[in-house]
Amino acid sequence: MEQGKLTLIWGGMFSGKTEEMIRRIRREIIAGKNAIVFKPTMDKRGSKDLVESHNGRAIQAVSVLDSREILHIAVTEMFNRKLDVVGIDEVQFLDIGLIGVIEALMKNGVDVICSGLDMDYKGEAFPVTKELAPISNECVKLNAVCVDCGKDAYISHRTVNQEGKVVIGGKDKYVALCKDCNSRRLDKTYR
């Protein structure tokens, strides 16, 4: 059996990560492959049965609590039908056990396409995406557009005063900024 491949699509908020994952999964389905898409239950934005991009593109999905649930559902799918592709959105919200689950899927010939943030609003790496990068066959780093100057943006700047590494939100809580504009905003905040 041929080993499956892992594609990691990562970057800051509003860079098109989910949209790119959806595009790639749809291509696989058009090619006649069986696919299933997962999303973390903690992401309550939009429908629980869909992965949705900020631009309104969507694909059917299964909400899961953790990596064990992904493994259970994927194995069940493999017994019921041939499973060719697994998509996982917002990987940064899942536990580190996801690495082993993805490796097991790949060993069984399943291609995995993941999307997620590379770092939080403080610039600290999310453990899951940091661990997925070295085992990926392909890493696609996407940038957004800086809302202040129009340059490439890779920083998800939090605009609300909420503590915690994970504060789920969209344009209501974050903007995409380049490094220079992020520094300028932080300077104004802490003066």
Image (spheres, rainbow, N blue to C red):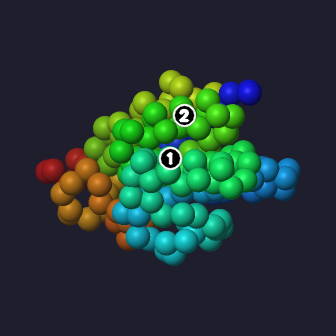
**Front position in the image: 175 or 36:** 36
Q: Residue at x 44, y 41 (%)?
A: 98
Q: Amino acid at mark 2?
A: Ala
Q: Which is nearer the N-term, disc 1 or disc 2?
A: 1
Residue located farthest toward the front when viewing the structure as drawn: 79
Q: Residue at x 65, y 48 (%)?
A: 78
Please report contact status of discs 1 and 2: CB closer than 8 Å, yes or no. Answer: yes
The image position of residue 89, as x and y in percent, is: 52, 53
Q: Would you say 163 lies left or right of 143 here? A: left
The image position of residue 47, as x and y in percent, is: 51, 75
Residue located farthest toward the left when viewing the structure as drawn: 191
**Secondary structure found at label 1:** helix
State which quadrant residue 4 falls in. top right
Estimate how packed mark 1 is, as few (under 14), some (14 to 19) or many (20 or more) residues with alpha carbons within 10 Å.
Answer: some
Residue located farthest toward the right when viewing the structure as drawn: 31
Q: Residue at x 50, y 59 (%)?
A: 39
| Position above or below: 48 against 189 | below
Circle 2 residue: 104
Instruction: Work out whether residue 51 can be spotted.
Output: no
Circle 1 residue: 71
Q: Amino acid at mark 1?
A: Leu
State which quadrant residue 54 falls in. bottom right
Estimate how packed mark 2 is, as few (under 14), some (14 to 19) or many (20 or more) residues with alpha carbons within 10 Å.
Answer: some
